[in-house]
Amino acid sequence: MPADFDKGAYPEPPRQTPVVDKQTALPNPALILSKLFYYSVDLPVTTFRGVVDNIRAKNRSVYYHQKFRRVPDLTECQEGDYTCYYEAEMQWRRDYKVDQEIVKVVQERLRACQQREGGSYQQNCAKEIQQFNETTRNFQLRYGDLGAYASGRKCLMKQKERMMAAQA
């Protein structure tokens, strides 16, 4: 700084932090409420959540491997047992989704083999081609021509018609 600077314009900073003058002897009510909330609500809830998380971490179930018990088929349901009808329909829908995923996996394997082998995939991917053809044929036999509103009942009737046609 220059030697002739204006000391009034730029005063020197204080050497010590000034002491805050308290206006009252009472404690701050906001501080009291925040401490009260912390010790009465936040701390117990956080502690409980930590304990529960530790217990759940030990026996963690994987959500995408949920196992459903097999329920009776529509053919095994008693007449008028709507709960059985519903369970059989939900079982059919799960089976349908699983079969769709199986076809997708086999198709991905075939595409990967075709990509890997290039022009000679016909001879080098014969096993994958045969597996894909068999899988799609089985899927088409079971679920083909059911339409947009496919159901377990429609699938059962299609199977019944196919069996009757095979006998004739």
Image (cartoon, rainbow, N blue to C red):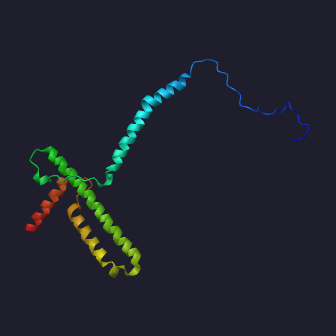
Nearest to the observer: residue 8 or residue 89: 8
Instruction: Say which quarter of the image contains residue 50.
Output: top left
Report whether 157 appears left or right of 133. Answer: left
**Residue 147 quadrant:** bottom left
- Please tell me whether residue 52 is drawn above or below residue 90 in the rendered image: above
**In this orientation, which residue lies closer to the viewer: 144 or 77?**
77
* Residue placed furthest toward the left: 168
Compared to residue 116, the image places residue 40 above or below, namely above
Task: Determine if residue 150 is in view.
Answer: no
Residue positioned 33% across, 77% down in the render: 125
Q: Residue at x 78, y 33 (%)?
A: 13
Instruction: Give the percent coordinates (x, y) of residue 21.
Output: 67, 22
100 lies left or right of 113: left
Residue at 73% of width from left, 31% of height from top?
16
Count up the numbered dots.
0
Q: Is residue 137 rendered to the left or right of residue 81?
A: right
Residue 141 showing in the rendered view? yes
